[in-house]
Amino acid sequence: MPADLIVYALVAAGLVFWLRNILGTTQGEERERSNPYLGPENPDAVKPDSDSQDKPLNAEQQIIALADDPVDGFGVDNKTAENGLIDIAKADREFDIEFFLQGAQDAFAMIVEAFAAGDRSALKGLLADDVYKAFDAAIADRDEKGHTQITDIHAIRKAMITKAYMQGKMAFITVKFTADESSVTRDAEGNTIAGNPDRVTKMNDIWTFGRELRSKNPAWFLYETRGDIEDDNELIPDSH
């Protein structure tokens, strides 16, 4: 055997011996080395505490959380409203405060813009009878005068629940809205008689939504509008 091959063989043997001493060998009774990124080997050591895990909040917890810490202006304004919402949630196991507030915001924008456009069909499916009558009368008066109105809701800045209560089978929730809007009213000749389509202003309104809890229809309807508050711009007729 050439001398250089003998040297290489001795070096290789030495490396094998050195690696075996450093890394060890796996015998039958030895445990396989664990991956440190998979956590401790003892499963009991990492068994999660069920109380410490994040769980979806139930309806009552959601209400309390929004009362304690409104999210970007959306929440529950006072303890009386909080207690009323909890009563509603107990009576209606499907009640979801976050879903309600999102739906109320959507309804607010739809109703304001539908009223401006005179869209009675859209309003009919969103308003209780008495409110619809007030809106219908206002639209009829506007049409008789030959006036037209355009209103755009750009953003809803706040939606705070100020009151919530049960009345027999009915549940009622009052929401104070603060929104950015632009609106213009023109006469029959197209002259601007109110508002400015290029100016965004703040709109405040207080609306009360209601629903019969035993009804199979999950929709909430607008039962009252009230704008007699600071900065009210009277875009929507008061129905109370």
Image: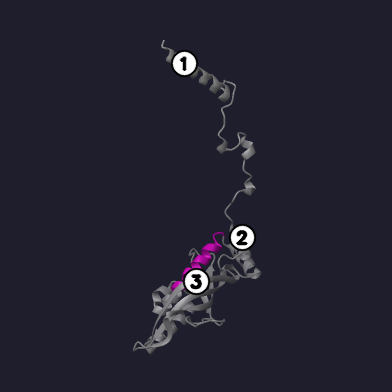
Of marks 1 and 2, the one in the foreground: 1
Residue 172 seen: no
Label 3's element? strand
Q: Which mark is residue 156?
A: 3
Q: Can you name the residue that lies furthest to the left here?
A: 189
Colouring scheme, one of rainbow, by chain, secondary structure, one colour: one colour
Residue occupying the point 57% across, 36% down:
36
Verify whether residue 60 appears in magenta: no
Which is more toward the observer, 38 or 132? 38
Do tag 1 and tag 2 residues touch (Cβ < 8 Å)? no
Q: Report whether 140 appears left or right of 214.
A: left
Label 1's element? helix
Do tag 1 and tag 3 residues touch (Cβ < 8 Å)? no
Residue type pointed to by label 1: Val
Label 2's element? helix
Residue extent of the magenta highlight: 93-110
Work out how far the residue at label 1 is from the one at label 2, CA to CA, in angstroms.
Answer: 80 Å
Label whose residue precedes the other's in the sequence (1 or 2): 1
Of marks 1 and 3, the one in the foreground: 1
| Mark 1 Cα shell of 10 Å, populated few (<14), some (14-19), many (≥20) | few
Instruction: Please give the residue where the numbered disc 1 appears in the rendered image.
Output: 7
Q: Which mark is residue 60?
A: 2
Residue 219, above or below 17: below
Residue type pointed to by label 2: Glu
